[in-house]
Amino acid sequence: MTTTPHEIPLGTAMRGQNGRMYVRAQAAGTVANDTAVVLTETGGAFTFVAGAGAFTTRAGADCLRRSLRIESNAI
């Protein structure tokens, strides 16, 4: 029997214990870890690219066209 791990849907937002918002999104290309990013929502697709945005990828994140939680820069 095989199972598929449950994945949090893209666009899901949650507040962390540190008070910051986290959003699950998909990298639109290669983005270095611990980098400011711009989050875009188009037709239900939540993607991010490197840039002076309101979110940051976390240190140690593998951002090569992967989906992951990005962290808001402000509380």
Image: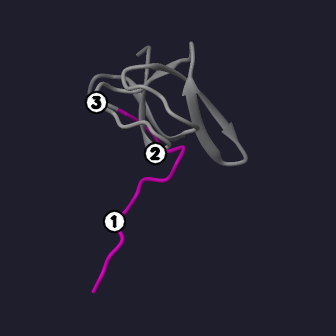
2 and 3 marks in contact (CB < 8 Å): no
Q: Position of residue 75 (x, y in %)?
A: 41, 16
Residue type for callout 3? Gly
Indicate whether 3 appears above or below 16. Answer: below
Query: Which residues are drawn in magenta?
Result: 1-15
Q: What number is the disc on residue 67?
A: 2
On the picture, is 42 further left or further right than 2?
right
Q: Position of residue 6 (x, y in %)?
A: 37, 63
Residue type for callout 1? Pro
Give the Cα separation between the discs numbered 2 and 3: 14 Å
The residue carrying mark 3 is 60
For marks 1 and 2 on the same chain, the one whose residue lies earlier in the sequence: 1
Q: Position of residue 33 (x, y in %)?
A: 37, 26
Most common secondary structure along the magenta stretch: loop
Q: What number is the disc on residue 54?
A: none
Secondary structure, mark 2, is strand
**Magenta-colored stretch includes residue 11:** yes
Residue type for callout 2? Ser
How crowded is the residue under tag 2: few (<14 C-alpha within 10 Å), some, or many (20+)?
many
Indicate whether 74 appears above or below 70. Answer: above
Residue 63 or residue 44, whichever sits in front: 63
Give the Cα separation between the discs numbered 1 and 3: 22 Å
Q: What number is the disc on residue 5?
A: 1
Residue 74 or residue 65, whichever sits in front: 65
Indicate whether 64 appears above or below 8. Answer: above
Residue 22 or residue 66, whichever sits in front: 66
Secondary structure, mark 1, is loop
